[in-house]
Image (cartoon, rainbow, N blue to C red):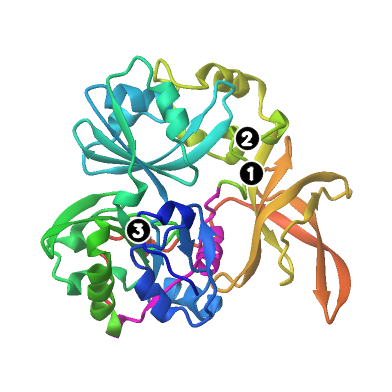
Amino acid sequence: MKTFNIDSPMHHKTKVFPSPFHSRQAEWNENKEWSRWYDYLSVPSYTDETMEYFAGRNTCGVFDITPMTKHLITGSDALPFMNRLVTRDVSKLKPGRVGYSVWCDDRGQVIDDGTIFHLQQGQYRLCSQEHQIDWLMINAHGFDVSIVEDTHDVAGLALQGPTSCAVLRKMNLPGIENLTPFGMASFDFEGTQLMISRTGFTGDLGYELWIDPDHAEVLWDRLFAAGELHGIQPMGSDALEMLRIEAGFIMAGADFAPALHTVRSKNTRSPFELGLDWLVDFKKPVFNGRRALLQEQQHGSRYALVKLDIEDNKAAEHSYVYDTRERNIGWVTSAKWSPSAKKNIALATVKRPHGKIDERMLVEIYYQRELAWSRKMAHAMVVEKPFWDPPRRRQTPPADW
């Protein structure tokens, strides 16, 4: 596998960055397969995606989140700018806290979702799936703010699973066990600052570790040394996909099409159509898409995003959804067999007025066995809660495994 030198003056010709953790990832990557996450090499699976999944549920798994797009927003107008940009009220997000949010175009259609880190007064970091620098700069007109995409300046690891806090405690990080969900704290680490947030994309107990790239390898080494007796394992994107679907978390490009990337406007979604109405705060006087979202609230939405419990064990990727009279009403956006819930699960988009809790539906599943294709009309039911939501996700302090 060809490796790349980030510091090389000819690096722009390689068109892809190795992560600051690349040397350590390469040692663990027995499959020798790499994928691309925007500007970076990423690992789909180090050995076996199912075993990596179980590390995330039974011990702890480590996923490289360095490629996540990051924007540093500072200045005297940082708060009013953020409040204009996103649908939630950012003024309620105190320094040292993290908040999930979405941002929309003028039609109230979701451009992307992500997390807002309130680093200190007048300083925020916005993390997202898509590159957003153009949209942020357009919306910054008239605001006294500085916006910098600092993706390459911050290395990140997600440490997820029931033993994650025990591993961090073993690294001698004072008070880490008292960090509450969506809180963050900084620690002295090998001559630099290590920022840790109690956040993640798995719906379980977990943390995200943020550090400057020059200290990435030593962080990996210290983390894995501390986790040796706690079942720590590296985890690829295939395992993470299983974990996030169980948690009911949506992903741009899978469960919705970002509004700035679509050609046909009917293919975009509003926060209401993604089940994110709790993120829309109409008490704020002005934010992008407010007028359109008020109209949608009054007149109703076109679609609903639902969680489906499907019979049998044939995963329903790319399947159509029907009502009980076999009329097409939608389609599956994400689907997996859940090893923990022991259920065939899916996220799906259905046309309103469908999507009510406990509503029964049919899912048309095609599957292949020994080169032969079979079709099954599987019964399904809309459920309210995520398929995985353990109490330890919120417990403070977490159990010391």
Most foreground residue, 389 or 376: 376
On screen, residue 292 versus residue 119, left or right, reads: right
Q: Quadrant of residue 209?
A: bottom left
Task: Tell me which amino acid carries mark 2.
Answer: Arg
Q: Residue 8's mark?
A: 3
Q: Which residue is mark 1?
A: 305
Earlier sequence position, callout 3 versus callout 1: 3
Q: Which residue is mark 2?
A: 269
User: Where 264 sits versus 388, above or below?
Assistant: above
**Number of numbered discs present?**
3
Q: Position of residue 379 (x, y in %)?
A: 78, 60
In the image, residue 237 lies in the stretch drawn in magenta = yes
Which residue is rendered at x = 77% and y = 52% of the image? 361
Task: Tell me which amino acid carries mark 3.
Answer: Ser
On screen, residue 119 versus residue 352, left or right, reads: left
Residue span colored magenta: 229-251
Q: Are marks 2 and 1 in contact (CB under 8 Å)?
A: yes
In the image, residue 207 lies in the stretch drawn in magenta = no
Most foreground residue, 157 or 217: 217
Q: Position of residue 333 (x, y in %)?
A: 67, 52
> Nearer the observer, disc 2 or disc 1?
2
Earlier sequence position, callout 2 versus callout 1: 2
On screen, residue 251 versus residue 10, left or right, reads: right
Q: Position of residue 269 (x, y in %)?
A: 63, 35
